[in-house]
Each structure stands twice: as structure tokens, then as C-alpha cells.
Amino acid sequence: MSYIEFENLNKSFGSNHVLKDISLGVEKGELVTLLGPSGCGKSTLLRCLSGLEQVTSGKVYLDGQDITNVNPRDRGIGMVFQQYSLFPNMSVADNVGFGLKMKKVPKEEADKKVKDILEIVGLSEKIDQFPMQLSGGQQQRVALARAIVTEPKVLLLDEPLSAIDALLRHNLQIEIRRIQQKLNITTIFVTHDQDEAMVMSDTIHLFNDGRIEQSGSPVDLYSKPATKFAATFIGNYNIFSAEDFGAACCEKLSCKDVAIRPEIVVMSKQPPEDEGCYHLKGAIVGHISHGNIIRFATKCGCIRINSDVLFEREMEYKEGDEVYLSVDKSLVIEL
């Protein structure tokens, strides 16, 4: 049995069946991400684990114990939400140490734990400041420190970075992962952001309409989507019916749909001669810059296919240009 185990778990709110027969395991020390669009059930599963929601049916196990009906305060679980929920009239030290005070930990021991955890999250110099004196990222690190100072068995993070600006969010992703690995704390992270999931996770469970659509490592989910939904949600795939793609490249395919990553579409102004590829011809109809990558959209017959080209000082291609595209057949995913 895994360290955390959900067994045939169902959760309904009236006639709304939010979680549908969920079974999954989380190993000790792992950082697992529940990924999916809003309303797919990922946060509800987190709340069922914490005890904030009662399950409709099924079981929840933690470290070999059935905790399905255990009081939330007795489960040994720490949580961090999108809202920091810090006490504005308390210092950083008092906010972080609040849980220790509630557990009646001796003051000398509690003070040492607070200082140690603030050093780990990089906020030692802020120990006497108040929440209003801190940036959003610093407040979130205080909330994280408060959740882990009590040494919970499991840390739950429910979209904790969604209200933070992009640059700071990226830095905090790396920081949370560093802290999680340093403390070897079993962590479940909820997000709708695929890039965030890719950066932080050991394992990703992709949710869709209350069910697990696909599970695996970040690399597996990105490179081997098992369904059309997975390909649509992760990786900006070009997705076409096999009939339409086959018509564009003058070949017959036996599958129903194909998924093609933009970075494997090779663009050229000369007809390609490489074997083992699908070949298409079309005209560029648009482009968008993504940092050092330019994503071109090319109309090839009845399909519009995106391809990623590394940015150079002089852009070789422009809208209206006739171009040739080649796609390695071995990299095309059949759905």
C-alpha cells in the first residue's frame, strides 16, 4: 500500500457527482500534482484527504491507517491555500508559531522550530515584521512555513501561487520544490497550470470531469498523451483528425486522430527530401512570439498547423510565404 491511498472514492454534492471512483496512491516523500481545468474535482479530492469534506463513498488511507472518518485536526496534515490567511496583527514569528502554540509545545522548543523553519524558507530577517510589511511572495512563504513547522505527515498545496505574478511565481515554484525535497515531506499540489505541474512534480494525475484521465511523470504526460483531452491540455499539441491530416500530406492513416508537437514540425522554403516524414505544403498565415521561440501558423489544405522556430535577429519567414513542412512519422502520436 502507498503512503497515501485513495480507494474507490466518490464525492457528490446533491446531484452533482464531483469525484467518480477515484483510486490512486502517493508514495512517501513524493511531490504529486493534481492537474486539470477548474471544476474537475482536484481541490475536492484534497479536501477529502484533509477531512474538510466527508467522502460519499470509498476510503482514504494515510501511512497504513484508515483516516476516512478521522477528525481533521488528528490527521497530521498541513495545508496552504491561495489566500495566505495570515493574522495581520501577529508578527511573522507568531504567525508561523501559531500551530505550535495550539499544540502547547514548550516556548523554548517552539521558538527554535520557528527560527529553523524561517531559515529554510529564507525569511530569517523578517521574523519580527508583520504581514502588511511583506511582499505577496514573502507572505506565501510565511504561510508555507506555518504549515510545515508542525512537521505534518502530508503537506497539501491548493493553488498557492495562482494570485502571484509570473516571475515571482516561477521563483516560488523552484523554492517550494527545494524545501519539499530538503524536508522529504510528502506533498500534494493542486494546479490548473500545466507549466507549473511540469516544473514541480514527481508524478502528475491529470483530472477531467471527476476522473483521472492520465497519470505519469511530467515527461510521460508531455511526450505520450494517452487521450485527445490529455494532448489538448498539455503541451500545445496540433490535433487533427487522421482524415484531415492525411489529406493535407497525401497519405492514408489508420488511426482516428493525430497529435503533433509544434517543435517537431520542421519548416523550410525548399521541398524536403528526408524519408520517414510526413510532408506538407502551405502558406504562413500568422505568427506569435514566445520568448526566444516564434510560433508560426501555416495553412496546409484544410488544416492549420503550428510550428516552433528559434528566434533569430533576421526573421527568415513572414506571413504569406509559401513553405514546406516535414514531420517525423515516429514522433506523431496516434490517438
Image (cartoon, rainbow, N blue to C red):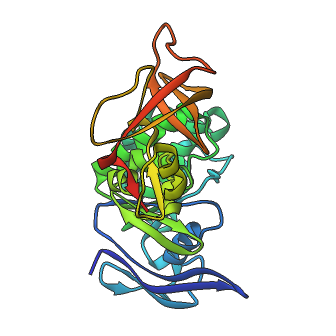
Residue farthest to the top, as pictured: 314
Residue drawn where x is 44% and y is 32% of the image: 325
Count of labels in the image: 0
Q: Position of residue 130 (x, y in %)?
A: 62, 39
Q: Nearer the viewer, residue 35 or 261?
A: 261
Q: Position of residue 98 (x, y in %)?
A: 53, 57
Residue drawn where x is 55% and y is 60% of the image: 36
Is residue 190 visible in the rendered structure shown here?
A: no
Q: Residue 132 lies in what quarter of the image?
A: top right
Left or right position of 89 against 266 = right
Name above or below for residue 50 compared with residue 317: below
Q: Nearer the viewer, residue 317 or 56?
A: 317
- In the picture, the quarter occupied by the C terminus is bottom left
Q: Position of residue 110 (x, y in %)?
A: 41, 55
- In the picture, the quarter occupied by the N terminus is bottom left
Is residue 185 visible in the rendered structure shown here?
A: yes
Q: Nearer the viewer, residue 90 or 17?
A: 17
Residue drawn where x is 54% and y is 33% of the image: 168
Q: Position of residue 73 (x, y in %)?
A: 51, 76
Residue farthest to the right, as pictured: 14
